[in-house]
Amino acid sequence: MKKLLRKIVLLNLISFFALTSCVKNEVTNLNLDKSSISINIGQSDTLNVTITSTGDINTQPLSWTSSNNDVVTFIEDNSSGTSVSESNTISKKFIVTALRTGTTIVTLRAGEKTVSCEVIVGQRNLSFTQVFASNYGDYYDIEKNSFDMYLLENTLSVDDSGKLVGTGTILYLDFIVPLSYNTIPNEQFYMSNEGADNTFFSGEAIESDGETYLIGSRIETFTETDATVWLIKDGQYTVTSDGNNFHIDGDLITADNEVIHFSYDGAIAVADKKEVPVQLHPDFTKGRLIYFGDAYTTGLSNNFLVDLVTQGVNFEDSVLNGEILSIEFNAPLTVKDSIPSGTYNMLPRDIETNDIVPYSLVFGYTTDDGYNWGTWYYSTETTKKFKTGSMKVTKTDDQYKIDYTLYDRFGSKVSGEYNGPLTYFNAIQKAPSNSFAAKVKKQKSSKTLMGINTQKKISRVKTFRFER
């Protein structure tokens, strides 16, 4: 009897392993979440794949093929990992990116199963029929001329009051040309934020004081009720002309990687928006002197700021209600609380640290974090950033006679004479409290004239040309 039972058990085990060995390790289900995709050049979409197998799912080979490899690329997205269930089902995500216009069939093979998705790639083409161009001169103070252009579709127009009428798309280009050019040159333009010749600025949305400002190149589409903005992050365009007729053709890359083609054929009239030079002769009635020590760490000179203001300006008031002239200068290291008599000349823009010597003026500049230093004029109507000029000082006891003649890059001139005392502040110990100088002490420690900021700041944002 025992022998019979052993035989039965042995036969059952043999049957079990025989049946088990007959189960194939194969893919039983292969599924894509989309049967077709339509995207534009540069854009991406996702394909989610679900695979079920009877055996070890990880042993199943997985491959992709495309009927046209020039149209799209596809890669596996491993950012969220791979999901495997207890029922031998695996899920994967793939990213499909459009390279050029066309149609391709993307096929996934796993084991003996295949599944396909049709991918249709198009491109947005913008054809413009109107251009409004302007020359702002050296608007960004980088020794280059700044131009901009608004290119409008034929469904948009501008009425006599300057109001934008209709629906459609505008392309705004903010670009740089050599200082010697007062028209748009026949050149190829590339995106750069360095202010180089024949380049255009990328688009940005900047937050300041609770407001959002759009600067740089961008595309805006207007409907009856709202507008959609695409910021330009890269691209190129070419300008050619034959007499008064211009041809502009290019490809721009938006922040979401879409590649948009645009073109324009026709005349371009350039409006002269360069700042008109003026001559100002302020009547300053009081002043103050602020000492910063060797702010530029030259070991050659101490740094000062003299602020001259008109009647009614309160140094402790954060609201400007008059005129202020801020002159930054350098004096000998032995001087810490006064302005020595003498003539002070503006430093050149291409200075080295060793050039920051006594009896020099510092030209106006803006740091990367947005602070103005150097020599500036402020009023309720205008701001002047000085590039050249001089100051002559005569000191008798505590009385000063300060003669100044200063020029900005557009040729505007601010000149005059101040007679009187100066209230003294030692900013190394304690900075003045008003908004024009409260930030001085903490900022001055990292002050440098090297690598002068050439980026666009809120104060230089070009306002949108048309009302809507």
Image (cartoon, rainbow, N blue to C red):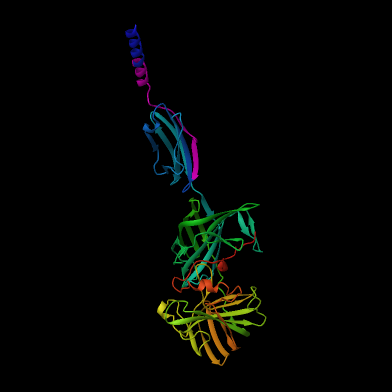
Residue 43 vs residue 105, the one in the foreground:
43
- From what the image shows, is residue 321 above or below residue 216? below
- From what the image shows, is residue 247 above or below residue 300? above
In the rendered picture of this protein, how many numbered marks are placed on residues? 0
Is residue 138 visible in this depiction of the protein?
Answer: no
Image: magenta residue range: 14-39
Is residue 220 visible in this depiction of the protein?
Answer: yes
Q: Position of residue 191 (x, y in %)?
A: 46, 60
Q: Position of residue 198 (x, y in %)?
A: 45, 65
Does the magenta portion include 31? yes
Q: Quadrant of residue 150?
A: bottom right
Q: Which residue is drawn at the image coordinates 60% and 79% (left, top)?
A: 324
Residue 132 vs residue 114, the one in the foreground:
114
Q: Which residue is drawn at the image coordinates 44% and 72% (left, top)?
A: 450
Outermost residue on the front side: it is 2
Q: Which quarter of the rendered picture does the N terminus lie within?
A: top left
Does the magenta portion include 350? no
Residue 104 vs residue 153, the one in the foreground:
104
Outermost residue on the bottom side: it is 396
Q: Position of residue 454 (x, y in %)?
A: 48, 68
Q: Position of residue 335 (x, y in %)?
A: 49, 86
Q: Which quarter of the rendered picture does the C terminus lie within?
A: bottom right
